[in-house]
Amino acid sequence: MKETNGNTSVEIEKPDQQHDLGLYFLELCRRKVKEELEDYDGDDEKEESPTELNTLNSSGGFVVVATDKLSVKYVNVNLHGHDVGVIQANRVAPMKRIVYYFEITVKDAGVKGQVSIGFTSENFKMRRQPGWEANSCGYHGDDGLLYRGHGKGENFGPTYTTGDIVGAGINYAAQEFFFTKNGRVVGTVYKDMKGPLFPTVAVHSQNEEVHVNFGQKPFIFDLKEFEAQERMKQQVKIEDIPVVPNARIVRSYLLHYGYEDTLDSFDLASRSTVPPINIVQDNGNDDQETTYALNHRKTLRQDSFCGHLVNCVNGIPRLLRTIHQLCVFCFIAKNLSN
């Protein structure tokens, strides 16, 4: 079905009933809201994910990376805070998805157990623990603290040591970092860092060694279930968002172009939803001053399309007189209210 005013047209599939037409426009409103909330979940398969450790951008002689580029070991003597063995992934964490996640297995906690896992920016100083510098976040194994951009940690979770499997993730839907230990979520924290971030691990005492899993084998953490729960949360948020702002836009469009029948169906559908959608005009007035001419405009369009030009010429003065009378009435009413 096409409803037109000569300059623009709205094409929609012909419904069984006029009421279905109004519901159709309401569904368009909901779809618009849903698209805005799911913009991060469209091209995840096209993004490249980290696959190994970046041996070209690490803290030099403090660590040795295995030939598979998935295991790293600290081979220096821990003397101060600037001899940390830090290494990033070969690619940034994908951003166009609900969640990104990776895990490490602590093969050896070494002398002090100063293993850490987290995310860092491209310009991160590669001889510092994740979280000790700006634009970085790290969960540390020796004290269980979370560090975010400075040297003072926050109480966060349990410590971890040899044999533990620890994970770090970005929940893009909730804009949070989250960390796990042995398959359970330890905690979450607001993601206050913008831009691309690299999965990062660090070791900082003799014989510390970790193995990284970027998804080349199954995670111990149930990532699919976590993603499903997040999608459900987002769906609830979508359903809870009122469609009134978008519905008002649709209604104003139909009103402006004089689609009288569609507007009536849209209003009927709005009142029939549960709960009803009460669309109040932005100016606080009712639609009397705007809708009075819809029928006249519809008649003029039909006469014009059918070639009844005489009827058009005769109808325009009547429409203009009505507009003039209404303008005078509105002016008087406004002054009386003041």
Image: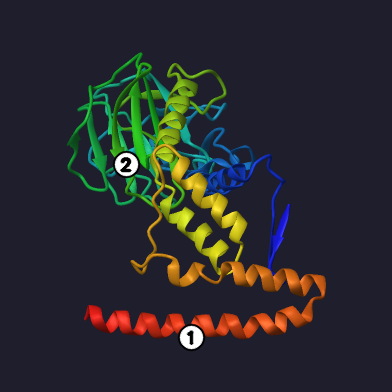
Distance in Å between CA atoms under marks 2 and 1? 66 Å
Element at label 2: strand
- Outermost right residue: 307
Q: Could one spot residue 265 in this view of the protein?
A: yes
Residue 95 showing in the rendered view: no
Task: Measuring from the top left, give residue 325's x and y in whole percent.
Answer: 46, 83
- When asked about the image quadrant of residue 63, the answer is top left
Choose between 39 and 191: the one closer to the eye.
Answer: 39
Badge 2: few (under 14), some or many (20 or more) residues near its Cα, within 10 Å?
Answer: many
292 lies above or below 15: below
Marked residue nearer the N-terminal end (2 or 1): 2
Query: Are the residues tagged 2 and 1 within 8 Å (C-beta)?
Result: no
Q: Indicate the amino acid at tag 1.
A: His
Of circles 2 and 1, the one toward us is 1
Residue 137, disc: 2
**Depth check: 263 or 231 in front?**
263
Q: Secondary structure at mark 1?
A: helix
Q: Quadrant of the C terminus?
A: bottom left
Which kind of residue does numbered mark 2 sit on?
A: Cys
Q: Does 78 sit left or right of 221 as displayed?
A: left
Residue 226: give x, y in percent of width and height: 43, 24
Return the x and y of residue 132 as percentages of the image width and height: 26, 45
Quick one: 43 or 301, which is closer to the camera?
301
* Residues packed near mark 1 inside 10 Å, few (<14), some (14 to 19) or many (20 plus): few
Q: Which residue occupies the extreme top position in the image?
A: 163
Q: Seen in the image, is 297 located left or right of residue 82?
A: right
The residue drawn where x is 30% and y is 52% is: 134
Residue placed under numbered mark 1 in the picture: 324
- Residue at 32% of width from left, 84% of height from top? 332
| Rendered location of residue 41, percent (x, y) | 54, 40
Can you tell which mark lies on residue 108? none
